[in-house]
Amino acid sequence: MSRDAAIGVFDSGLGGLTVAKAIRERLPSERLVYLGDTARVPYGSRSGRTVVRYARTCGRYLAQDEIKMIVVACNTVSAVALDSLRVDLDIPVVGVITPGAQAGVRATKNGRLGVIATRGTIASGAYVRAVSAESSRVEVFARPAPLLVPLAEEGWLDDEIAHATVARYLEPFVDDEIDSLVLGCTHYPLLRNTIEAEGARLFSKLSVVDGAEATAIAVDELLVQYQLSRQGEGELSIRVTDLPGRFSEVAGRFLGEPVDRMEVEQVDLSPS
Amino acid sequence: MSRDAAIGVFDSGLGGLTVAKAIRERLPSERLVYLGDTARVPYGSRSGRTVVRYARTCGRYLAQDEIKMIVVACNTVSAVALDSLRVDLDIPVVGVITPGAQAGVRATKNGRLGVIATRGTIASGAYVRAVSAESSRVEVFARPAPLLVPLAEEGWLDDEIAHATVARYLEPFVDDEIDSLVLGCTHYPLLRNTIEAEGARLFSKLSVVDGAEATAIAVDELLVQYQLSRQGEGELSIRVTDLPGRFSEVAGRFLGEPVDRMEVEQVDLSPS
Protein backbone atom coordinates (compact mmCIF):
# COMPACT_ATOMS: atom_id res chain seq x y z
CA MET A 1 0.00 0.00 0.00
CA SER A 2 1.37 3.42 -1.00
CA ARG A 3 1.55 6.49 1.25
CA ASP A 4 0.36 8.41 -1.80
CA ALA A 5 -2.92 6.52 -1.95
CA ALA A 6 -6.02 8.47 -1.04
CA ILE A 7 -8.23 8.11 2.01
CA GLY A 8 -11.77 7.18 1.06
CA VAL A 9 -14.41 9.02 3.10
CA PHE A 10 -18.07 8.27 2.70
CA ASP A 11 -21.40 9.31 4.13
CA SER A 12 -25.03 8.89 3.21
CA GLY A 13 -25.06 12.53 2.14
CA LEU A 14 -23.19 15.76 2.70
CA GLY A 15 -23.04 15.81 6.52
CA GLY A 16 -19.84 13.77 6.44
CA LEU A 17 -18.11 16.78 4.91
CA THR A 18 -17.75 18.03 8.52
CA VAL A 19 -15.52 14.97 9.06
CA ALA A 20 -13.64 15.62 5.80
CA LYS A 21 -13.15 19.20 7.02
CA ALA A 22 -11.71 18.02 10.36
CA ILE A 23 -9.36 15.57 8.59
CA ARG A 24 -8.18 18.28 6.18
CA GLU A 25 -7.49 20.64 9.05
CA ARG A 26 -5.45 18.05 10.94
CA LEU A 27 -3.87 16.30 7.93
CA PRO A 28 -3.54 18.89 5.14
CA SER A 29 -1.16 16.68 3.10
CA GLU A 30 -3.61 13.82 2.63
CA ARG A 31 -5.59 13.15 -0.53
CA LEU A 32 -9.26 12.59 0.25
CA VAL A 33 -11.93 11.09 -1.98
CA TYR A 34 -15.34 11.92 -0.53
CA LEU A 35 -18.39 9.94 -1.62
CA GLY A 36 -21.83 11.23 -0.63
CA ASP A 37 -24.66 8.83 -1.42
CA THR A 38 -27.03 11.74 -1.94
CA ALA A 39 -29.37 9.64 -4.09
CA ARG A 40 -30.23 7.53 -1.05
CA VAL A 41 -29.77 9.98 1.84
CA PRO A 42 -30.76 9.81 4.68
CA TYR A 43 -29.74 6.41 5.96
CA GLY A 44 -30.80 7.33 9.52
CA SER A 45 -34.44 6.42 8.98
CA ARG A 46 -33.70 3.06 7.31
CA SER A 47 -33.45 -0.46 8.72
CA GLY A 48 -30.04 -1.82 9.71
CA ARG A 49 -30.15 -4.39 6.92
CA THR A 50 -30.66 -1.69 4.31
CA VAL A 51 -27.89 0.47 5.78
CA VAL A 52 -25.42 -2.44 5.60
CA ARG A 53 -26.34 -3.04 1.97
CA TYR A 54 -25.89 0.63 1.04
CA ALA A 55 -22.63 0.91 2.98
CA ARG A 56 -21.10 -2.10 1.21
CA THR A 57 -21.97 -0.53 -2.14
CA CYS A 58 -20.19 2.67 -1.12
CA GLY A 59 -17.16 0.82 0.22
CA ARG A 60 -16.79 -1.28 -2.92
CA TYR A 61 -17.10 1.82 -5.08
CA LEU A 62 -14.29 3.62 -3.24
CA ALA A 63 -12.09 0.50 -3.24
CA GLN A 64 -12.10 0.46 -7.07
CA ASP A 65 -9.32 3.08 -6.81
CA GLU A 66 -6.18 2.67 -4.75
CA ILE A 67 -7.10 3.81 -1.26
CA LYS A 68 -5.20 3.21 1.96
CA MET A 69 -8.01 3.69 4.44
CA ILE A 70 -11.78 4.08 4.62
CA VAL A 71 -13.34 6.63 6.94
CA VAL A 72 -17.03 6.04 7.54
CA ALA A 73 -18.10 9.64 8.11
CA CYS A 74 -21.62 8.62 9.05
CA ASN A 75 -22.87 7.62 12.48
CA THR A 76 -25.66 5.46 11.10
CA VAL A 77 -23.23 3.36 9.04
CA SER A 78 -20.62 3.32 11.80
CA ALA A 79 -23.28 1.93 14.16
CA VAL A 80 -24.15 -1.13 12.10
CA ALA A 81 -21.83 -1.75 9.13
CA LEU A 82 -18.15 -1.49 10.16
CA ASP A 83 -17.75 -5.24 10.53
CA SER A 84 -19.26 -5.91 7.10
CA LEU A 85 -16.98 -3.30 5.54
CA ARG A 86 -13.90 -4.81 7.20
CA VAL A 87 -14.83 -8.22 5.79
CA ASP A 88 -15.24 -6.74 2.30
CA LEU A 89 -12.15 -4.52 2.24
CA ASP A 90 -8.58 -5.36 3.26
CA ILE A 91 -7.64 -1.86 4.48
CA PRO A 92 -8.22 -0.10 7.82
CA VAL A 93 -11.81 1.08 8.32
CA VAL A 94 -12.39 3.95 10.76
CA GLY A 95 -15.85 4.88 11.99
CA VAL A 96 -16.96 8.00 13.85
CA ILE A 97 -18.55 6.38 16.90
CA THR A 98 -15.55 4.85 18.69
CA PRO A 99 -13.46 8.06 18.43
CA GLY A 100 -16.43 10.14 19.62
CA ALA A 101 -17.12 7.76 22.51
CA GLN A 102 -13.44 7.75 23.53
CA ALA A 103 -13.33 11.55 23.49
CA GLY A 104 -16.53 11.62 25.55
CA VAL A 105 -15.04 9.27 28.15
CA ARG A 106 -11.98 11.53 28.39
CA ALA A 107 -14.17 14.64 28.69
CA THR A 108 -16.51 13.58 31.49
CA LYS A 109 -15.38 14.28 35.04
CA ASN A 110 -18.44 12.93 36.88
CA GLY A 111 -18.87 9.81 34.69
CA ARG A 112 -22.25 10.92 33.33
CA LEU A 113 -22.07 11.33 29.56
CA GLY A 114 -24.82 12.50 27.21
CA VAL A 115 -25.09 11.61 23.53
CA ILE A 116 -27.39 13.15 20.91
CA ALA A 117 -27.76 11.59 17.45
CA THR A 118 -30.37 10.51 14.91
CA ARG A 119 -33.06 8.04 15.94
CA GLY A 120 -31.34 5.25 14.03
CA THR A 121 -27.98 5.76 15.75
CA ILE A 122 -29.55 5.99 19.21
CA ALA A 123 -31.74 2.93 18.61
CA SER A 124 -28.67 0.93 17.56
CA GLY A 125 -27.17 1.33 21.05
CA ALA A 126 -23.77 1.80 19.42
CA TYR A 127 -22.62 4.70 21.62
CA VAL A 128 -23.57 2.85 24.80
CA ARG A 129 -21.55 -0.17 23.63
CA ALA A 130 -18.58 1.96 22.50
CA VAL A 131 -18.43 3.78 25.84
CA SER A 132 -18.76 0.50 27.78
CA ALA A 133 -15.82 -0.87 25.80
CA GLU A 134 -13.74 2.12 26.95
CA SER A 135 -14.77 2.44 30.57
CA SER A 136 -17.06 0.63 32.96
CA ARG A 137 -17.34 3.74 35.11
CA VAL A 138 -19.06 6.03 32.62
CA GLU A 139 -22.85 5.98 32.35
CA VAL A 140 -24.32 6.99 28.98
CA PHE A 141 -27.58 8.90 28.47
CA ALA A 142 -28.44 8.83 24.77
CA ARG A 143 -31.38 10.58 23.11
CA PRO A 144 -32.36 11.40 19.50
CA ALA A 145 -32.33 15.01 18.26
CA PRO A 146 -33.65 14.64 14.69
CA LEU A 147 -34.70 18.26 14.06
CA LEU A 148 -31.08 19.42 14.27
CA VAL A 149 -30.38 17.86 10.85
CA PRO A 150 -32.83 19.99 8.84
CA LEU A 151 -31.93 23.05 10.92
CA ALA A 152 -28.28 22.59 9.87
CA GLU A 153 -29.28 22.08 6.23
CA GLU A 154 -31.60 25.11 6.30
CA GLY A 155 -28.80 27.18 7.86
CA TRP A 156 -30.91 28.16 10.87
CA LEU A 157 -27.97 27.78 13.21
CA ASP A 158 -28.19 30.51 15.81
CA ASP A 159 -31.70 31.93 15.86
CA GLU A 160 -34.73 31.71 18.13
CA ILE A 161 -35.93 28.44 16.57
CA ALA A 162 -32.49 26.80 16.72
CA HIS A 163 -32.12 27.78 20.38
CA ALA A 164 -35.63 26.58 21.31
CA THR A 165 -35.10 23.27 19.49
CA VAL A 166 -31.68 22.66 21.04
CA ALA A 167 -33.06 23.55 24.48
CA ARG A 168 -35.94 21.11 24.00
CA TYR A 169 -33.49 18.32 23.24
CA LEU A 170 -31.05 19.22 26.06
CA GLU A 171 -33.60 19.67 28.86
CA PRO A 172 -34.16 15.92 29.53
CA PHE A 173 -30.41 15.58 30.19
CA VAL A 174 -30.54 18.03 33.11
CA ASP A 175 -32.02 15.45 35.48
CA ASP A 176 -29.36 12.99 34.29
CA GLU A 177 -26.71 15.43 35.61
CA ILE A 178 -24.41 14.91 32.61
CA ASP A 179 -21.31 17.09 32.43
CA SER A 180 -20.34 16.24 28.82
CA LEU A 181 -22.26 15.75 25.59
CA VAL A 182 -21.12 13.93 22.45
CA LEU A 183 -22.47 15.27 19.14
CA GLY A 184 -23.23 11.90 17.55
CA CYS A 185 -24.34 13.14 14.13
CA THR A 186 -22.18 14.73 11.47
CA HIS A 187 -24.66 17.60 11.04
CA TYR A 188 -24.55 18.73 14.65
CA PRO A 189 -21.15 20.53 14.68
CA LEU A 190 -22.80 23.32 12.67
CA LEU A 191 -25.00 23.99 15.69
CA ARG A 192 -22.14 23.69 18.17
CA ASN A 193 -22.23 27.35 19.25
CA THR A 194 -25.96 27.16 19.95
CA ILE A 195 -25.57 23.82 21.76
CA GLU A 196 -22.79 25.29 23.90
CA ALA A 197 -24.85 28.40 24.65
CA GLU A 198 -27.95 26.42 25.69
CA GLY A 199 -25.68 24.00 27.58
CA ALA A 200 -24.19 26.92 29.54
CA ARG A 201 -27.70 28.14 30.32
CA LEU A 202 -29.12 24.77 31.43
CA PHE A 203 -26.10 23.11 33.10
CA SER A 204 -23.55 24.31 35.63
CA LYS A 205 -20.94 22.95 33.20
CA LEU A 206 -21.27 21.06 29.93
CA SER A 207 -18.36 20.04 27.70
CA VAL A 208 -19.42 19.52 24.09
CA VAL A 209 -17.48 16.79 22.26
CA ASP A 210 -17.31 16.94 18.46
CA GLY A 211 -17.03 13.44 16.96
CA ALA A 212 -15.57 14.82 13.72
CA GLU A 213 -12.49 16.21 15.47
CA ALA A 214 -12.06 12.98 17.44
CA THR A 215 -12.26 10.98 14.21
CA ALA A 216 -9.57 13.11 12.54
CA ILE A 217 -7.25 12.36 15.48
CA ALA A 218 -7.97 8.63 15.16
CA VAL A 219 -7.18 8.75 11.43
CA ASP A 220 -3.90 10.56 12.16
CA GLU A 221 -2.86 7.96 14.75
CA LEU A 222 -3.72 5.07 12.48
CA LEU A 223 -1.75 6.53 9.54
CA VAL A 224 1.29 6.92 11.80
CA GLN A 225 0.88 3.38 13.11
CA TYR A 226 0.72 1.91 9.60
CA GLN A 227 3.46 4.30 8.32
CA LEU A 228 1.07 5.60 5.70
CA SER A 229 1.17 9.37 6.37
CA ARG A 230 1.56 11.41 3.22
CA GLN A 231 3.77 14.46 2.52
CA GLY A 232 3.16 17.33 0.13
CA GLU A 233 0.02 19.11 -0.91
CA GLY A 234 -3.28 17.45 -0.16
CA GLU A 235 -6.45 17.45 -2.22
CA LEU A 236 -10.13 16.72 -1.94
CA SER A 237 -12.27 15.13 -4.64
CA ILE A 238 -16.04 15.11 -4.05
CA ARG A 239 -18.33 12.57 -5.68
CA VAL A 240 -22.06 12.24 -5.17
CA THR A 241 -24.76 9.90 -6.41
CA ASP A 242 -27.19 12.76 -7.02
CA LEU A 243 -26.71 16.49 -7.49
CA PRO A 244 -29.72 18.22 -5.96
CA GLY A 245 -30.52 21.92 -5.95
CA ARG A 246 -28.62 24.04 -3.40
CA PHE A 247 -25.86 21.44 -3.50
CA SER A 248 -23.02 23.97 -3.41
CA GLU A 249 -24.64 26.03 -0.65
CA VAL A 250 -25.26 23.06 1.66
CA ALA A 251 -21.97 21.30 0.86
CA GLY A 252 -20.03 24.51 1.42
CA ARG A 253 -21.67 25.01 4.80
CA PHE A 254 -20.58 21.54 5.96
CA LEU A 255 -17.09 21.69 4.45
CA GLY A 256 -16.46 25.21 5.70
CA GLU A 257 -15.13 26.36 2.32
CA PRO A 258 -16.69 27.05 -1.09
CA VAL A 259 -17.65 24.03 -3.20
CA ASP A 260 -17.75 24.45 -6.96
CA ARG A 261 -20.56 22.29 -8.28
CA MET A 262 -18.79 21.99 -11.61
CA GLU A 263 -15.87 20.19 -9.95
CA VAL A 264 -18.12 17.64 -8.27
CA GLU A 265 -18.46 14.33 -10.05
CA GLN A 266 -21.81 12.54 -10.14
CA VAL A 267 -21.34 8.78 -10.04
CA ASP A 268 -23.61 5.79 -10.41
CA LEU A 269 -23.25 3.06 -7.80
CA SER A 270 -24.25 -0.19 -9.45
CA PRO A 271 -27.07 -1.76 -7.42
CA SER A 272 -25.86 -4.30 -4.89
CA MET B 1 -61.16 -2.61 -16.33
CA SER B 2 -63.16 -3.72 -13.32
CA ARG B 3 -64.86 -1.46 -10.78
CA ASP B 4 -63.53 -3.87 -8.17
CA ALA B 5 -59.92 -3.17 -9.07
CA ALA B 6 -57.91 -1.25 -6.51
CA ILE B 7 -56.60 2.30 -6.72
CA GLY B 8 -52.82 2.39 -6.49
CA VAL B 9 -51.50 5.25 -4.35
CA PHE B 10 -47.81 5.91 -4.01
CA ASP B 11 -45.46 8.32 -2.34
CA SER B 12 -41.77 8.51 -1.61
CA GLY B 13 -42.56 7.74 2.02
CA LEU B 14 -45.39 7.93 4.49
CA GLY B 15 -46.58 11.53 3.93
CA GLY B 16 -48.87 10.35 1.13
CA LEU B 17 -50.95 8.58 3.76
CA THR B 18 -52.62 11.98 4.30
CA VAL B 19 -53.88 11.63 0.71
CA ALA B 20 -54.93 8.00 1.32
CA LYS B 21 -56.79 9.25 4.40
CA ALA B 22 -58.63 11.92 2.39
CA ILE B 23 -59.58 9.37 -0.31
CA ARG B 24 -60.83 6.90 2.31
CA GLU B 25 -62.94 9.59 3.94
CA ARG B 26 -64.52 10.60 0.65
CA LEU B 27 -64.64 7.15 -1.00
CA PRO B 28 -64.99 4.57 1.79
CA SER B 29 -65.95 1.79 -0.65
CA GLU B 30 -62.73 1.87 -2.64
CA ARG B 31 -59.87 -0.59 -2.26
CA LEU B 32 -56.55 1.22 -1.93
CA VAL B 33 -53.05 -0.20 -2.30
CA TYR B 34 -50.56 2.24 -0.81
CA LEU B 35 -46.88 2.00 -1.70
CA GLY B 36 -44.39 4.06 0.32
CA ASP B 37 -40.86 3.99 -1.09
CA THR B 38 -39.42 4.39 2.40
CA ALA B 39 -36.07 2.90 1.38
CA ARG B 40 -35.47 5.94 -0.86
CA VAL B 41 -37.41 8.70 0.91
CA PRO B 42 -37.19 11.69 0.58
CA TYR B 43 -37.44 12.38 -3.13
CA GLY B 44 -37.71 16.15 -2.50
CA SER B 45 -33.96 16.67 -2.31
CA ARG B 46 -33.16 14.64 -5.45
CA SER B 47 -32.70 15.68 -9.07
CA GLY B 48 -35.67 15.50 -11.45
CA ARG B 49 -34.06 12.72 -13.44
CA THR B 50 -33.70 10.56 -10.34
CA VAL B 51 -37.28 11.28 -9.26
CA VAL B 52 -38.62 10.17 -12.65
CA ARG B 53 -36.63 6.94 -12.45
CA TYR B 54 -37.88 6.16 -8.94
CA ALA B 55 -41.49 7.05 -9.84
CA ARG B 56 -41.51 4.71 -12.84
CA THR B 57 -40.29 1.88 -10.61
CA CYS B 58 -43.16 2.55 -8.19
CA GLY B 59 -45.73 2.81 -10.98
CA ARG B 60 -44.62 -0.44 -12.60
CA TYR B 61 -44.68 -2.22 -9.25
CA LEU B 62 -48.28 -1.18 -8.57
CA ALA B 63 -49.36 -2.04 -12.13
CA GLN B 64 -48.32 -5.67 -11.59
CA ASP B 65 -51.71 -6.09 -9.88
CA GLU B 66 -55.03 -5.11 -11.44
CA ILE B 67 -55.45 -1.43 -10.62
CA LYS B 68 -57.87 1.02 -12.19
CA MET B 69 -56.10 4.25 -11.35
CA ILE B 70 -52.80 5.57 -9.98
CA VAL B 71 -52.78 8.42 -7.48
CA VAL B 72 -49.39 10.05 -7.15
CA ALA B 73 -49.63 11.15 -3.52
CA CYS B 74 -46.36 13.03 -3.67
CA ASN B 75 -45.84 16.60 -4.81
CA THR B 76 -42.25 15.99 -5.90
CA VAL B 77 -43.29 13.17 -8.23
CA SER B 78 -46.42 15.01 -9.40
CA ALA B 79 -44.19 17.94 -10.36
CA VAL B 80 -41.91 16.04 -12.72
CA ALA B 81 -43.06 12.49 -13.49
CA LEU B 82 -46.78 12.38 -14.38
CA ASP B 83 -46.12 12.37 -18.12
CA SER B 84 -43.61 9.52 -17.85
CA LEU B 85 -46.07 7.52 -15.73
CA ARG B 86 -48.88 8.07 -18.25
CA VAL B 87 -46.64 6.79 -21.02
CA ASP B 88 -45.77 3.69 -18.98
CA LEU B 89 -49.26 2.84 -17.71
CA ASP B 90 -52.53 2.72 -19.62
CA ILE B 91 -54.77 3.83 -16.73
CA PRO B 92 -55.65 7.29 -15.40
CA VAL B 93 -52.86 8.91 -13.37
CA VAL B 94 -53.87 11.60 -10.87
CA GLY B 95 -51.30 13.87 -9.22
CA VAL B 96 -51.74 16.17 -6.25
CA ILE B 97 -50.60 19.44 -7.82
CA THR B 98 -53.36 20.14 -10.35
CA PRO B 99 -56.17 19.46 -7.83
CA GLY B 100 -54.41 21.63 -5.24
CA ALA B 101 -53.83 24.43 -7.75
CA GLN B 102 -57.47 24.31 -8.91
CA ALA B 103 -58.71 24.48 -5.32
CA GLY B 104 -56.36 27.39 -4.71
CA VAL B 105 -57.70 29.27 -7.73
CA ARG B 106 -61.26 28.73 -6.44
CA ALA B 107 -60.27 29.89 -2.94
CA THR B 108 -58.55 33.18 -3.74
CA LYS B 109 -60.75 36.26 -3.91
CA ASN B 110 -58.03 38.82 -4.65
CA GLY B 111 -56.10 36.68 -7.18
CA ARG B 112 -53.00 36.45 -4.98
CA LEU B 113 -52.27 32.84 -4.08
CA GLY B 114 -49.48 31.52 -1.87
CA VAL B 115 -47.98 28.03 -2.09
CA ILE B 116 -45.63 26.34 0.40
CA ALA B 117 -43.90 23.06 -0.48
CA THR B 118 -40.50 21.33 -0.42
CA ARG B 119 -37.57 22.97 -2.18
CA GLY B 120 -37.80 20.45 -5.01
CA THR B 121 -41.47 21.11 -5.69
CA ILE B 122 -41.03 24.90 -5.58
CA ALA B 123 -37.95 24.78 -7.81
CA SER B 124 -39.87 22.74 -10.39
CA GLY B 125 -42.29 25.63 -10.94
CA ALA B 126 -45.12 23.09 -11.15
CA TYR B 127 -47.63 25.03 -9.04
CA VAL B 128 -47.07 28.22 -11.03
CA ARG B 129 -47.68 26.28 -14.26
CA ALA B 130 -50.74 24.48 -12.88
CA VAL B 131 -52.33 27.73 -11.69
CA SER B 132 -51.56 29.44 -15.02
CA ALA B 133 -53.31 26.60 -16.82
CA GLU B 134 -56.42 27.27 -14.70
CA SER B 135 -56.53 31.05 -14.68
CA SER B 136 -54.52 33.89 -16.12
CA ARG B 137 -55.76 36.22 -13.40
CA VAL B 138 -54.22 34.50 -10.39
CA GLU B 139 -50.69 35.38 -9.38
CA VAL B 140 -48.73 32.68 -7.52
CA PHE B 141 -46.19 33.30 -4.75
CA ALA B 142 -44.39 30.03 -4.02
CA ARG B 143 -41.79 29.45 -1.31
CA PRO B 144 -40.18 26.38 0.28
CA ALA B 145 -40.97 25.41 3.89
CA PRO B 146 -38.69 22.40 4.43
CA LEU B 147 -38.66 22.33 8.25
CA LEU B 148 -42.37 21.52 8.34
CA VAL B 149 -41.64 17.95 7.20
CA PRO B 150 -39.50 16.92 10.18
CA LEU B 151 -41.81 18.84 12.54
CA ALA B 152 -44.72 16.71 11.27
CA GLU B 153 -42.67 13.52 11.60
CA GLU B 154 -41.50 14.47 15.10
CA GLY B 155 -45.09 15.24 16.09
CA TRP B 156 -44.26 18.81 17.15
CA LEU B 157 -47.47 20.13 15.63
CA ASP B 158 -48.79 22.86 17.89
CA ASP B 159 -46.01 24.04 20.19
CA GLU B 160 -43.78 27.10 20.44
CA ILE B 161 -41.27 25.75 17.90
CA ALA B 162 -43.97 24.76 15.38
CA HIS B 163 -45.60 28.19 15.66
CA ALA B 164 -42.27 30.06 15.32
CA THR B 165 -41.26 27.96 12.30
CA VAL B 166 -44.63 28.37 10.57
CA ALA B 167 -44.56 32.12 11.27
CA ARG B 168 -41.04 32.36 9.80
CA TYR B 169 -42.25 30.72 6.60
CA LEU B 170 -45.52 32.72 6.37
CA GLU B 171 -44.05 36.19 7.07
CA PRO B 172 -42.60 36.77 3.56
CA PHE B 173 -46.09 36.23 2.11
CA VAL B 174 -47.51 39.20 4.06
CA ASP B 175 -46.01 41.73 1.65
CA ASP B 176 -47.38 39.65 -1.24
CA GLU B 177 -50.88 40.26 0.18
CA ILE B 178 -52.01 36.70 -0.48
CA ASP B 179 -55.49 35.73 0.76
CA SER B 180 -55.15 31.95 0.23
CA LEU B 181 -52.37 29.42 0.78
CA VAL B 182 -52.03 25.98 -0.79
CA LEU B 183 -50.31 23.32 1.33
CA GLY B 184 -48.16 21.82 -1.42
CA CYS B 185 -46.61 18.97 0.57
CA THR B 186 -48.37 15.90 1.92
CA HIS B 187 -46.85 16.41 5.38
CA TYR B 188 -48.25 19.89 5.88
CA PRO B 189 -51.91 19.02 6.66
CA LEU B 190 -50.71 17.77 10.06
CA LEU B 191 -49.71 21.35 10.84
CA ARG B 192 -52.90 22.83 9.41
CA ASN B 193 -54.21 24.14 12.76
CA THR B 194 -50.94 25.90 13.47
CA ILE B 195 -50.75 27.29 9.93
CA GLU B 196 -54.31 28.59 10.24
CA ALA B 197 -53.58 30.12 13.65
CA GLU B 198 -50.43 31.91 12.43
CA GLY B 199 -52.28 32.88 9.24
CA ALA B 200 -55.05 34.48 11.31
CA ARG B 201 -52.42 36.37 13.32
CA LEU B 202 -50.39 37.62 10.32
CA PHE B 203 -53.10 38.20 7.68
CA SER B 204 -56.47 39.91 7.77
CA LYS B 205 -57.79 36.75 6.12
CA LEU B 206 -56.03 33.60 4.91
CA SER B 207 -57.80 30.54 3.47
CA VAL B 208 -55.71 27.39 3.81
CA VAL B 209 -56.17 24.89 0.97
CA ASP B 210 -55.35 21.23 1.65
CA GLY B 211 -54.16 19.50 -1.52
CA ALA B 212 -55.04 16.06 -0.11
CA GLU B 213 -58.75 16.90 0.11
CA ALA B 214 -58.69 18.42 -3.37
CA THR B 215 -57.04 15.28 -4.75
CA ALA B 216 -59.70 13.03 -3.19
CA ILE B 217 -62.37 15.09 -4.95
CA ALA B 218 -60.50 14.76 -8.27
CA VAL B 219 -60.26 10.98 -7.81
CA ASP B 220 -64.00 10.81 -7.09
CA GLU B 221 -64.87 12.80 -10.22
CA LEU B 222 -62.60 10.70 -12.41
CA LEU B 223 -64.07 7.41 -11.11
CA VAL B 224 -67.57 8.66 -11.89
CA GLN B 225 -66.48 9.82 -15.35
CA TYR B 226 -64.94 6.41 -16.17
CA GLN B 227 -67.81 4.54 -14.46
CA LEU B 228 -65.33 2.85 -12.18
CA SER B 229 -66.75 3.71 -8.72
CA ARG B 230 -66.87 0.72 -6.41
CA GLN B 231 -69.65 -0.41 -4.01
CA GLY B 232 -69.31 -2.32 -0.75
CA GLU B 233 -66.71 -2.23 1.95
CA GLY B 234 -63.36 -0.62 1.13
CA GLU B 235 -59.94 -1.65 2.31
CA LEU B 236 -56.41 -0.34 2.57
CA SER B 237 -53.25 -2.37 2.03
CA ILE B 238 -49.96 -0.69 2.95
CA ARG B 239 -46.65 -1.72 1.39
CA VAL B 240 -43.27 -0.14 2.02
CA THR B 241 -39.75 -0.66 0.71
CA ASP B 242 -38.23 -0.34 4.18
CA LEU B 243 -39.67 -0.69 7.67
CA PRO B 244 -37.85 1.77 9.90
CA GLY B 245 -38.28 2.26 13.63
CA ARG B 246 -41.32 4.27 14.78
CA PHE B 247 -43.03 3.19 11.55
CA SER B 248 -46.42 2.59 13.18
CA GLU B 249 -46.30 5.84 15.15
CA VAL B 250 -45.44 8.02 12.16
CA ALA B 251 -47.71 6.18 9.70
CA GLY B 252 -50.62 6.33 12.16
CA ARG B 253 -50.16 10.08 12.57
CA PHE B 254 -50.42 10.62 8.79
CA LEU B 255 -53.25 8.15 8.22
CA GLY B 256 -55.23 9.39 11.20
CA GLU B 257 -55.90 5.85 12.44
CA PRO B 258 -53.77 3.12 14.03
CA VAL B 259 -51.41 1.21 11.73
CA ASP B 260 -50.44 -2.32 12.73
CA ARG B 261 -46.88 -2.88 11.64
CA MET B 262 -47.53 -6.60 11.36
CA GLU B 263 -50.08 -6.00 8.61
CA VAL B 264 -47.70 -3.91 6.54
CA GLU B 265 -45.90 -5.71 3.75
CA GLN B 266 -42.27 -4.93 2.97
CA VAL B 267 -41.60 -5.22 -0.75
CA ASP B 268 -38.52 -5.09 -2.93
CA LEU B 269 -38.72 -2.88 -6.02
CA SER B 270 -36.39 -4.35 -8.59
CA PRO B 271 -33.84 -1.71 -9.60
CA SER B 272 -34.82 0.24 -12.67
Image (spheres, coloured by chain):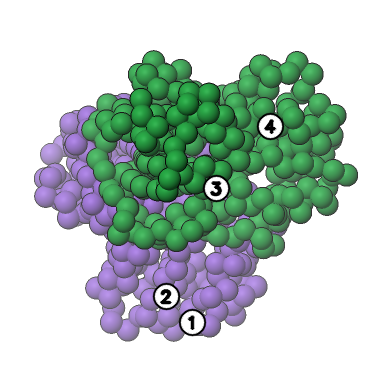
Chain colours: A purple, B green
**Residue type indicated by callout 2:** Phe
The residue carrying mark 1 is A176
**Residue type indicated by callout 3:** Glu
Q: Residues within 10 Å of mark 4 (few under 14, many from 20)?
A: many
Identify the image quadrant of the N terminus of chain B.
Answer: top left
Identify the chain of the residue marked 1, using the numbered disc in the image. Answer: A
Q: Secondary structure at mark 2?
A: strand
Q: Residues within 10 Å of mark 3 (few under 14, many from 20)?
A: few
CB atoms of marks 4 and 2 within 8 Å: no
Q: Nearer the viewer, mark 3 or mark 2?
A: 3
Q: Could you tell me residue B41's position as x and y percent?
A: 41, 41
Q: Are marks 1 and 2 on the same chain?
A: yes
**Rounded to the nearest whole Å, what is the CA distance between mark 4 and mark 2?**
49 Å
Q: Secondary structure at mark 1?
A: loop
Q: Are marks 1 and 3 on the same chain?
A: no
Q: Are marks 4 and 2 on the same chain?
A: no
**Rounded to the nearest whole Å, what is the CA distance between mark 1 and mark 3?**
45 Å
Q: Could you tell me residue B172's position as x and y percent?
A: 77, 38
**Rounded to the nearest whole Å, what is the CA distance between mark 1 and mark 2?**
7 Å
| Residue B25, numbered circle | 3
The residue carrying mark 4 is B103
Residue at coordinates 14% horizontally, 44% vertically from top-left? A89
Q: Quick check: A14 above or below A217?
A: above
| Residue A141, numbered circle | 2
Quick check: can you spot residue A25? no
Point out the tag, 1 or 2, that comes first from the N-terminus: 2
Residue at coordinates 40% horizontally, 42% vertically from top-left? B31
Point out the tag, 3 or 4, that comes first from the N-terminus: 3
